[in-house]
């Protein structure tokens, strides 16, 4: 089989397999899923922060031998500010059409900040998947067996994050069918990254750390700006303890999947 065909097949596996396994949450009855989502939001916060600080940023810093670390820090800062502006634009668009207060829920709509979080998670996840595609292609260009292992490892460590993405999309008001549809579309970023890397890998090497940092910034921004404030609405000691435990479990799951598969 031609090398390009191997890259295409396993980039699709790397992107779609994790989505397929994580989408099991959509099979739960509506009532069960509704009761679970507030708890799973805390878990999703942990997976987002874990993916950013334990996966994406360390990988970006590995390239700082040839790239100024200050540029990495500046990229992270500008990306966070950029996602703030992007969220403002999403909120303005909703309020222009709905004539709403962006932070005030009504009987027919979720808070607009939650809707914006759903949009931002798709942007960040597509960027992350694009980077995964580059990594899969680079591994196959080195050795076919390494490429296969890399694609399967990426699919495995993406499962907890993809589960978190589904939770955030459902929490943001997406219907189950739309959450699945958009996650599948986002997973195709892996294929796009793999194809571009196959033809332009040398040219993309210098851009890879910055792409990783942009993806990390999106996850950090969503967790800190959009999801964590919602947890403060439930501030009883028992609820707070549950939130801390679930966030910690999300972080630990990312840590162990990364340490096991790398």
Image (cartoon, grey):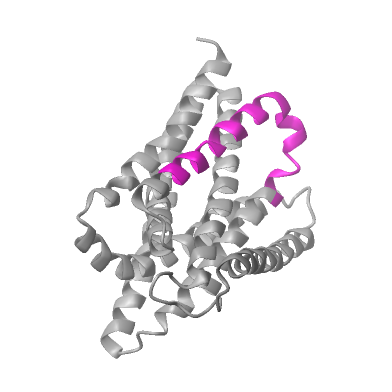
Say above or below: 254 vs 8: below
Q: Is residue 167 left or right of residue 185?
A: left
Between 6 and 170, the one lying in front of the other is 170
Q: Is residue 225 visible?
A: yes
Expressed as whole percent of the image width and height from the top left, the position of residue 94 reads 58, 66
Report the magenta stretch's main SS: helix
What residue lies at 73% left-to-right and 52% top-to-bottom? 64
Say above or below: 132 vs 220: above
Question: Magenta stretch?
Answer: 181-210
Between 131 and 84, the one lying in front of the other is 84
What residue lies at 73% left-to-right and 37% top-to-bottom? 204
What residue lies at 69% left-to-right and 67% top-to-bottom? 85
Q: Is residue 198 magenta?
A: yes
Q: Is residue 51 magenta?
A: no
Say above or below: 216 vs 12: below
Q: Is residue 3 left or right of residue 204?
A: left
Q: Is residue 149 visible?
A: no
Say above or below: 43 vs 9: below
What residue lies at 47% left-to-right and 45% top-to-bottom? 182
Expressed as whole percent of the image width and height from the top left, the position of residue 141 reads 61, 23
Q: Residue furthest bottom?
A: 236
Expressed as whole percent of the image width and height from the top left, the position of residue 170 reads 38, 59
Expressed as whole percent of the image width and height from the top left, the position of residue 187 reads 49, 40
Q: Quadrant of residue 34?
A: bottom left
């Amino acid at each position: 089989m031609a090398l390009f065909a191997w890259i295409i097949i396993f980039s699709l596996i790397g992107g779609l397999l994790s989505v397929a396994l994580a989408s099991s949450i959509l099979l739960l009855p509506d009532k069960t899923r509704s009761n679970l989502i507030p708890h799973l939001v805390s878990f999703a916060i942990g997976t987002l922060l874990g993916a950013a600080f334990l996966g994406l940023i360390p990988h970006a810093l590995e390239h700082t031998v040839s790239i100024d670390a200050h540029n990495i820090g500046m990229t992270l800062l500008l990306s966070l500010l950029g996602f703030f502006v992007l969220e403002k634009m999403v909120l303005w668009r909703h309020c222009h059409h709905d004539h709403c207060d962006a932070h005030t829920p009504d009987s027919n709509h979720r808070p607009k900040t939650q809707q914006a979080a759903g949009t931002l998670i798709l942007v960040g996840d597509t960027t992350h998947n694009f980077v995964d595609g580059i990594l899969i292609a680079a591994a196959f260009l080195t050795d076919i067996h390494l490429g296969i292992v890399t694609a399967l490892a990426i699919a495995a460590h993406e499962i907890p994050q993809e589960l978190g993405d589904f939770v955030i999309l459902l929490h943001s008001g997406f219907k189950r069918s739309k959450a699945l549809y958009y996650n599948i579309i986002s997973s195709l970023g892996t294929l796009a990254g793999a194809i571009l890397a196959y033809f332009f890998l040398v040219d993309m090497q210098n851009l890879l750390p910055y792409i990783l940092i942009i993806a990390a910034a999106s996850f950090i921004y969503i967790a800190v700006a959009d999801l964590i404030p919602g947890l403060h609405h439930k501030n009883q000691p028992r609820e707070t303890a549950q939130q801390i435990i679930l966030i910690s479990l999300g972080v630990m799951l990312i840590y162990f999947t990364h340490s096991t598969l790398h």
